[in-house]
Amino acid sequence: MQIAQESSDFQHNVNIIRHKAVCQKLQISSAKLFDMVARSQFPKPFALIPGGRAVGWLESDVDQWVLGRKATLNREAA
């Protein structure tokens, strides 16, 4: 799902990805994703509609988490 957000100088696209897409992107199982969220090892999703059951993540937040993990591993290896 992509949302276009207007600003004064440019248009910024915000991508929302659902549970299955996050699992595919990280190449992990659904159970592992649930476990990581429960243990606060991965960002919690947000409700797409107030009071609704559908949840998602901003793709940029998922990407930022991946880059943070990479930076942590690089520091630990040094």
Image (tube, grey):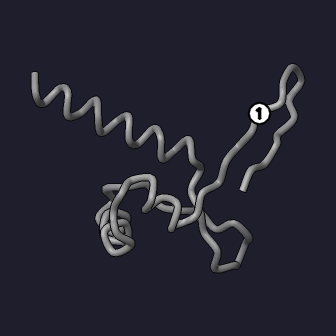
Q: Judge from the rendering whether residue 60 lies leftward or rightward of residue 23; answer left or right.
A: right
Image x and y of residue 61, in percent: 51, 44
Q: Is residue 22 left or right of residue 5?
A: left
In what quadrant of the picture does the N terminus appear? bottom right
Q: Residue at x 60, y 69 (%)?
A: 55
Residue placed at 82% from the left, 40% from the top? 5
Residue located 48% across and 58% down the image: 22
Residue 26 in percent (x, y) is at 38, 53
Number of labelled discs? 1
Task: Name the quadrant containing residue 35.
Answer: bottom left
Q: Is residue 53 above or below residue 9?
A: below
- Which part of the image, by quadrant, shows the C terminus? top left
Horizontal placement of 64 versus 56: left or right?
Answer: left
Q: Which amino acid type is marked by label 1?
A: His
Name the residue that disc number 1 marks. Answer: 12
> At numbered mark 1, what does the secondary structure look like: helix, strand or loop?
strand
Name above or below for residue 21 compared with residue 35. above
Rendering coords of residue 56 (x, y %): 59, 62
* Above or below 10: residue 73: below
Can you give x and y, in whole percent of width and height, for residue 6 in the image? 87, 35
Residue drawn at x 38%, y 34% as measured from the top left: 67
**What is the crowding at mark 1: few (fewer than 14 residues within 10 Å), some, or many (at least 20)?**
few
Question: In the image, 31: left or right of 11?
Answer: left
Tell me the quarter of the picture where residue 41 sits: bottom left
